[in-house]
Image: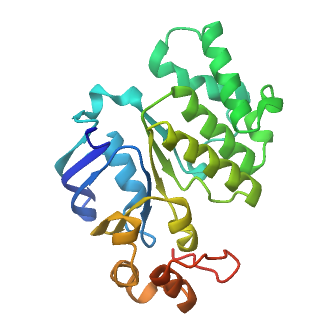
Amino acid sequence: MSPPAIEVHNLTVAYGQKPVLWDIDVSIPSGNLVAIVGPNGAGKSTLLKAVLGLIPATNGFVKALNREVSDVRKEIGYVPQRETVDWDFPVSVLDVVEMGRYGRIGWLKRPSKRDREVALSCLEQVGMSGFAKRQISQLSGGQQQRVFLARALAQEPEIYLMDEPFAGVDAATEQTIIEILRNLRSNGKTIIAVHHDLQTISDYFDWVAMLNLHLVAAGPITEAYTPENLQKTYGGRLTILDQVAEAIRTGLPRSRQDATTEAS
């Protein structure tokens, strides 16, 4: 059996005196599409950053592919929230995607012909090959999200951590992204994404981790993504409609237009 993609043991993270993650213990299996869900302030983005070592843990530790994260950092691709990026930085689309190669070639080396070919191929995968020379700030939000996905693809990692990859994108971009993620899964990759649209969880993902400061539930969608665990995760702040909860119980197809289920 393959080792878990990510193992988190007794992880606690605090900003000053305020804990934002408390005693998280979860093992995420390889080769799955994994959703991280929970209300605003639940610690979802913090969990991704703590896994990457971008923020220090107060307690606990994280492993990736059964090794220290620092030893396999190039095997972990990261797509941050689009709002956290300085889009006015004067670089082209191709420049951004080539940055995904630096973990393999080193920051002081220039990308080779092979690296450029990989970057162009990744842009083609996300439907952005015609924008290679465009300045990144001139793109729409959905186009920027595609470019950051292309950058992660260019890294050729085993694990993809994605912070709200579908936020602010149109329906066509969302479908493009999910098809790419499904292809990655078919090739044995692990994708872990912070996600807010509760209606599409069962359609898009195989596995779910439900957070609200602590880990409420984690496991395959069919086992962990239940109305009871949703109630525990969101409590009184949950605004999911009755038909969505019923669809989860029965496995009936859900339409994104049935209800607004943004729970953050």
> Is 115 on the left or on the right of 201, as rendered?
right
- At which x and y percent is residue 132? 77, 27
| Horizontal relation, residue 243 to residue 10: left or right | right
Residue at image x 51%, y 77%?
Answer: 251
Q: Identify which residue is drawn at 67% across, 83% down.
A: 258
Q: Residue at x 58, y 52 (%)?
A: 165
Above or below, 189 against 48 in this view is: above
Q: How many marks?
A: 0
Residue situated in front as seen by the camera: 72 or 32: 32
Q: How is the image coloured?
A: rainbow
Give the quadrant of residue 46: bottom left
- Picture coordinates of residue 214 (x, y %)? 26, 68
Relative to 143, is 218 on the left or the right? left
Q: Is residue 143 visible?
A: yes
Nearer to us in this view, 76 or 258: 258
**For residue 57, above or below residue 40:** above
Left/right of residue 226 with respect to residue 62 in the rendered view: right
Q: Is residue 242 above or below residue 92?
A: below
Residue 49: x, y in percent? 38, 47
Q: Position of residue 127 (x, y in %)?
A: 76, 38
Q: If the image is split into quadrants, where does the N terminus sit?
A: top left
Q: Residue at x 45, y 21 (%)?
A: 103
Above or below 42: residue 7: above
Determine if residue 239 is in view: no
- 47 and 160: which is toward the camera: 160
- In which quarter of the view is residue 223 placed? bottom left
